[in-house]
Image (cartoon, rainbow, N blue to C red):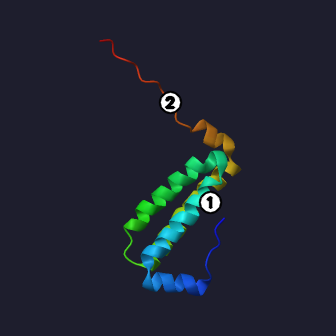
Amino acid sequence: MAELPDFDTLMWMAQHSPEELDKLQQNLSEELISSAGKNAWQLRAVNQHLTHKLARCSNPYQRCITTVTLMRNKFDSLAQVLQDPEHFRNNMAQVLPFKRKSA
Protein backbone atom coordinates (compact mmCIF):
# COMPACT_ATOMS: atom_id res chain seq x y z
CA MET A 1 0.00 0.00 0.00
CA ALA A 2 1.21 3.50 -0.80
CA GLU A 3 2.68 5.41 2.10
CA LEU A 4 0.82 8.40 3.48
CA PRO A 5 2.91 11.60 3.49
CA ASP A 6 3.73 13.21 6.83
CA PHE A 7 1.35 15.72 8.40
CA ASP A 8 3.30 18.80 7.29
CA THR A 9 3.26 17.65 3.68
CA LEU A 10 -0.48 16.97 3.85
CA MET A 11 -1.05 20.42 5.36
CA TRP A 12 0.99 22.05 2.60
CA MET A 13 -0.99 20.12 -0.02
CA ALA A 14 -4.29 21.20 1.56
CA GLN A 15 -3.26 24.85 1.43
CA HIS A 16 -1.43 24.98 -1.90
CA SER A 17 -2.57 22.02 -3.98
CA PRO A 18 -5.99 20.75 -2.90
CA GLU A 19 -6.45 18.93 -6.23
CA GLU A 20 -3.31 16.90 -5.59
CA LEU A 21 -4.47 16.10 -2.05
CA ASP A 22 -7.86 15.00 -3.39
CA LYS A 23 -6.17 12.77 -5.96
CA LEU A 24 -3.98 11.23 -3.22
CA GLN A 25 -7.11 10.53 -1.15
CA GLN A 26 -8.85 8.91 -4.13
CA ASN A 27 -5.83 6.75 -4.93
CA LEU A 28 -5.40 5.59 -1.34
CA SER A 29 -9.12 4.88 -1.00
CA GLU A 30 -9.18 2.86 -4.21
CA GLU A 31 -6.09 0.91 -3.18
CA LEU A 32 -7.67 0.03 0.16
CA ILE A 33 -11.05 -0.84 -1.38
CA SER A 34 -9.43 -3.05 -4.01
CA SER A 35 -7.76 -5.07 -1.27
CA ALA A 36 -11.10 -5.76 0.46
CA GLY A 37 -11.97 -8.81 -1.63
CA LYS A 38 -15.66 -9.73 -1.75
CA ASN A 39 -16.69 -6.67 0.29
CA ALA A 40 -15.13 -4.18 -2.12
CA TRP A 41 -18.47 -3.37 -3.75
CA GLN A 42 -19.92 -2.27 -0.39
CA LEU A 43 -16.94 -0.07 0.34
CA ARG A 44 -17.16 1.46 -3.14
CA ALA A 45 -20.82 2.30 -2.49
CA VAL A 46 -19.97 3.97 0.84
CA ASN A 47 -17.07 5.83 -0.76
CA GLN A 48 -19.24 7.04 -3.65
CA HIS A 49 -21.94 8.18 -1.22
CA LEU A 50 -19.35 10.05 0.83
CA THR A 51 -17.85 11.63 -2.29
CA HIS A 52 -21.28 12.97 -3.33
CA LYS A 53 -21.92 14.37 0.14
CA LEU A 54 -18.47 15.99 0.31
CA ALA A 55 -18.99 17.67 -3.07
CA ARG A 56 -21.74 19.76 -1.46
CA CYS A 57 -19.51 20.96 1.39
CA SER A 58 -18.20 24.51 1.32
CA ASN A 59 -15.26 24.25 3.72
CA PRO A 60 -12.92 21.70 5.34
CA TYR A 61 -14.75 21.79 8.68
CA GLN A 62 -18.04 20.89 7.01
CA ARG A 63 -16.28 18.06 5.12
CA CYS A 64 -14.93 16.71 8.42
CA ILE A 65 -18.33 16.82 10.16
CA THR A 66 -20.00 15.22 7.12
CA THR A 67 -17.47 12.39 7.06
CA VAL A 68 -17.69 11.74 10.80
CA THR A 69 -21.51 11.77 10.70
CA LEU A 70 -21.69 9.34 7.79
CA MET A 71 -19.21 6.94 9.38
CA ARG A 72 -20.94 7.14 12.77
CA ASN A 73 -24.24 6.25 11.10
CA LYS A 74 -22.63 3.29 9.33
CA PHE A 75 -21.08 2.04 12.58
CA ASP A 76 -24.41 2.46 14.41
CA SER A 77 -26.14 0.37 11.72
CA LEU A 78 -23.47 -2.31 11.98
CA ALA A 79 -23.75 -2.35 15.78
CA GLN A 80 -27.53 -2.82 15.54
CA VAL A 81 -27.10 -5.78 13.17
CA LEU A 82 -24.47 -7.35 15.44
CA GLN A 83 -26.60 -6.88 18.55
CA ASP A 84 -29.84 -8.16 17.04
CA PRO A 85 -29.21 -10.13 13.83
CA GLU A 86 -32.70 -11.68 13.87
CA HIS A 87 -34.32 -8.26 13.68
CA PHE A 88 -32.12 -7.50 10.66
CA ARG A 89 -33.03 -10.81 8.96
CA ASN A 90 -36.75 -10.30 9.62
CA ASN A 91 -36.71 -6.79 8.11
CA MET A 92 -34.93 -7.60 4.87
CA ALA A 93 -36.78 -6.67 1.71
CA GLN A 94 -38.23 -9.46 -0.34
CA VAL A 95 -36.92 -9.32 -3.90
CA LEU A 96 -39.60 -10.06 -6.45
CA PRO A 97 -38.83 -11.04 -10.03
CA PHE A 98 -40.13 -8.92 -12.89
CA LYS A 99 -42.95 -10.53 -14.83
CA ARG A 100 -42.52 -10.34 -18.56
CA LYS A 101 -45.39 -9.12 -20.60
CA SER A 102 -46.30 -11.32 -23.48
CA ALA A 103 -45.96 -9.60 -26.84
Mark nearer the N terminus (1 vs 2): 1
* Residue depicted at 51% across the width and 58% down the height: 47
In the picture of the structure, the residue carrying the numbered disc 2 is 95
Q: Position of residue 12 (x, y in %)?
A: 50, 86
Q: Is residue 24 above or below residue 61?
A: above
Q: CA distance from mark 1 to mark 2?
A: 31 Å
Residue 65, disc: none
Packing grade of label 2 (10 A; few <14, some 14-19, many >=20) is few
Q: Position of residue 102 (x, y in %)?
A: 33, 12
Describe residue 82's horizontal placement relative to residue 53 as left or right. Answer: right
At label 1, the amino acid type is Leu
Q: Is residue 81 visible?
A: yes
Q: Nearer the viewer, residue 4 or 50?
A: 4
Tell me where residue 16 sits by quadrant.
bottom left
Secondary structure beneath dot 2 equals loop
Q: Nearer the viewer, mark 1 or mark 2?
A: 1
Q: Is residue 86 above or below residue 101?
A: below
Residue occupying the point 34% across, 16% down: 101
The residue carrying mark 1 is 32
Label 1, residues with CA under 10 Å away: few <14, some 14-19, many ≥20: some
Residue in front for this viewpoint, 53 or 22: 22
Residue at 53%, 69% (x, y): give it: 25
One can see residue 75 in this view: no
Q: Up-down: is 3 above or below 46?
A: below
x, y percent for residue 51: 45, 62
Q: Quadrant of the N terminus?
A: bottom right
The quadrant of the picture occupied by the C terminus is top left
Secondary structure under badge 1?
helix
Q: Of the residues shown, which amino acid type is indicated by label 2? A: Val
For the point 38% across and 18% down, the residue is 100
